[in-house]
Amino acid sequence: MKYLWLFIFVFQSHAQRSDFDHINFQKADSIALTCKDEGLYNLPQLAFKLTSNLTTDVERFRAIYKWVCTNIANDYNLYLRNKRKRTKFKNDSLKLTEWNTRFKKEIFRKLLKQEKTICTGYAYIVQELSKLANIDCEIVHGFGKTSTTHIEKSDPPNHSWNAVKLNNKWYLCDPTWASGIPNPETNAFKFKYNDGYFLANPKLFAVNHFPLERQWALIESAPTFDEFLAAPILYGNAYANLTGHNAPKEMYHLIHKYETLQFEYELQSVVNTETIRFLIDNGHHSQKVKPTSIHLENQSLILEQQFDVKGFYDVHLYIGDDLISTYTVKVKS
């Protein structure tokens, strides 16, 4: 039995978008666009319109997922309100249960009437439409880490996403983060679909998603919670450019002058290395610099950066205009 489970996890680690490179999703995307004005009052009818003219489960799921990501808005104010309440009541189980019950009703009311929600609403509607199309889909609860979240071990889980079964393999998707970006200053939401969260590579997904039930990591050596907390910050553009983030595993680094750090990635496609830059910020000024060395072989990218001056630095990786990831480096003499 031990070897059987090992086989399953190794097998699952390859479950990603590239499994369906032979599929053209143009028809599914077109159907999702055609159904733009459909509401949520009749889910069976919506599921039928989205999927009835498609021949494979992955295309049917694609139409469902794309419709949700391009029609349901992220209500970030609602998310912040829930976060404040859950933090306030985390040591009072009765009040927390009462709030969760009341909040669930509000989530579904807003989802139905305003087509606005938070992550649990996104994951729920993707699951319900998938079930109506006879596609196995689960809601995965856990922690999501972005540049604006501060996760403490005692905090309740703050994010939800989906696992979907296609061709007898499970895949990961994040419809919330794929739908667009709330403005951090005004909390106003703007639709901006990010295809990188559709059937994402589990290894990349694990850098900023930590499921409460570890089997939904879909990789054999899933990070521990401490490893997840210590990992670098990944931005949405990472999912549009990468299939894997291999090194460094941690965000914070303490090195000596003249030492180098190595960064390793797997790219979705070959890029022009002349567009690769580090933005290095010491708190007083920032400068974009070309990495000390760049090695690109097929789609494996290895960068090295040497630090010659003592100080504390935020190091941001850019590929072209896309911000990919952030690390911090303290250089001592």
Image (tube, rainbow, N blue to C red):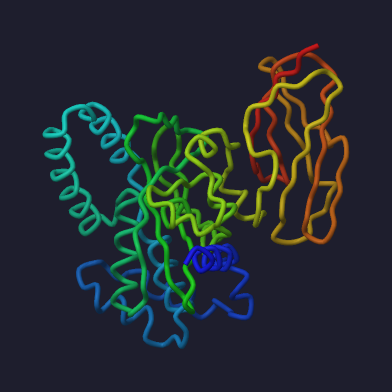
Q: In this view, does 304 lie to the left or right of 31?
A: right
Image coords of residue 164 (percent x, y): 42, 68
Q: Residue at left 30%, top 63%?
A: 125
Q: Is residue 99 left or right of residue 193?
A: left
Q: In this view, does 161 lie to the left or right of 209?
A: left
Q: Residue at left 25%, top 66%?
A: 40
Image coords of residue 286 (percent x, y): 72, 23
304 in relation to 210, above or below: above
- Residue 279: image quadrant is top right
Image coords of residue 148 (percent x, y): 48, 33
Of residues 187 and 234, the one drawn nearer to the viewer in this rendering: 234
Q: Is residue 28 left or right of residue 236?
A: left
Image coords of residue 303 (percent x, y): 81, 42
Of residues 36 and 11, the one drawn nearer to the viewer in this rendering: 11
Q: Residue at left 38%, top 52%?
A: 213
Of residues 310 and 11, the one drawn nearer to the viewer in this rendering: 11
Q: Residue furthest top?
A: 333
Q: In which quarter of the image is the C terminus?
A: top right
16 in relation to 155, above or below: below
Q: Which residue lies furthest to the front in this view?
A: 1
- Residue 152: image quadrant is top left
Q: How many numbered dots are placed on residues in this image?
A: 0
